[in-house]
Amino acid sequence: MIRANPVNKPRPDELWEANQSDLEYQVTLSIPVDAMTGLSQGVVQINRFYEYPTPQIPFSLPPQFPSPTSCFRVDTGFIVSADEGEKGGGIFAFDESGQQCTTILQCPCLGLLHLQGTIFAICGHQNQDNGQIMRLEKNSHSSWHTLPAADHFDHAVAFTQETSQSALILTRRYLMRCELGFGGNLAMQRLMEHDFRDLYPNSMVISQAENGCVYIGMRKYVVRLPRDMSSGQFFREEWFLPQES
């Protein structure tokens, strides 16, 4: 685990310098988030980022399968999402053995969310402002399909579950909250605009031990967003420079 020292918010020229850096940092929690509650009592850890972690999948994926991002168990087997960037990706249904695979949707998928018993997928192409959240449902023949749940936001780069019915999504320009409302509809709320889109954020976690503040890992820096507990809003950016011994 890497320690980080607080620094002033980088100037535009320092942000450009950081954009050219080959140092990238990822934030994780020492205890994984519970998929049902969205909570974790783990402490925030900072590590060098080399590639996105591979989710635990209890079978071997087919050759040439795109990079998996999430795997959820369902009553029919498993739902696996994948994101290959500009090359594509998708959402796939596997049976229990992993031998039979059905494509549910062909689209880059950053990952899956489990909100109040419903699975949602965060989709979109990284070079286009066409972010979309899809709801996964089964039809009368027990085949999985998707329905639009929210759209018209810019490309999502990281997300983390906040509660059993909400998640925080970091897009190229905003920190947003998606919340499951009445009738299973998703409400999208912009929480704040940010200035680190050019530092390629790669991960985001919530520290329950610090009143729900958010940590974001990216190129050269880590950003902490304190939360006002009375309003639930985020009111400033705190920048940290990781120091490797």
Image (cartoon, helix red, strand yellow):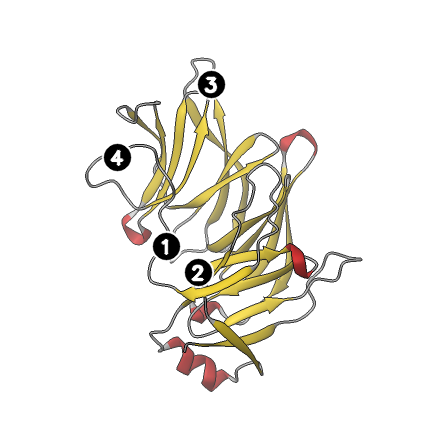
How dense is the environment of label 1, judged by Cα within 10 Å: few (below 14), some, or many (20 and up)? few
Q: Amino acid at mark 2?
A: Asn
Residue corresponding to mark 4? 60
Q: Nearer the viewer, residue 98 or 243?
A: 243
Q: Position of residue 198 (x, y in %)?
A: 44, 71
Q: Amino acid at mark 4?
A: Ser
How dense is the environment of label 2, judged by Cα within 10 Å: few (below 14), some, or many (20 and up)? many
Residue corresponding to mark 2? 202
Judge left or right: residue 100 versus residue 148.
left
Residue at far top of view: 141
Residue corresponding to mark 1? 52
Q: SS class of the residue under badge 2?
A: loop
- Which label sits on residue 139? 3
Query: Looking at the rendering, in which quadrant would you find the N terminus?
Result: bottom left
Instruction: Check if mark 2's residue and mark 1's residue have beta carbons within 8 Å.
Output: yes
Task: Point out the frontmost of discs 3 and 2.
Answer: 2
Tell me if I can see residue 173 in this picture.
no
Q: Residue at x 51, y 75 (%)?
A: 4
Pointer 2 or 1: first along the chain? 1
Q: Position of residue 18 (x, y in %)?
A: 42, 78
Q: Amino acid at mark 1?
A: Tyr
Q: Residue at x 22, y 35 (%)?
A: 62
Residue at far right of view: 230
Alpha carbons under labels 3 and 2: distance apart: 34 Å
Q: Amino acid at mark 3?
A: Asn
- Which label sits on residue 149? none
Q: SS class of the residue under badge 4?
A: loop
Alpha carbons under labels 3 and 1: distance apart: 32 Å
Alpha carbons under labels 2 and 1: distance apart: 8 Å
Alpha carbons under labels 4 and 2: distance apart: 26 Å
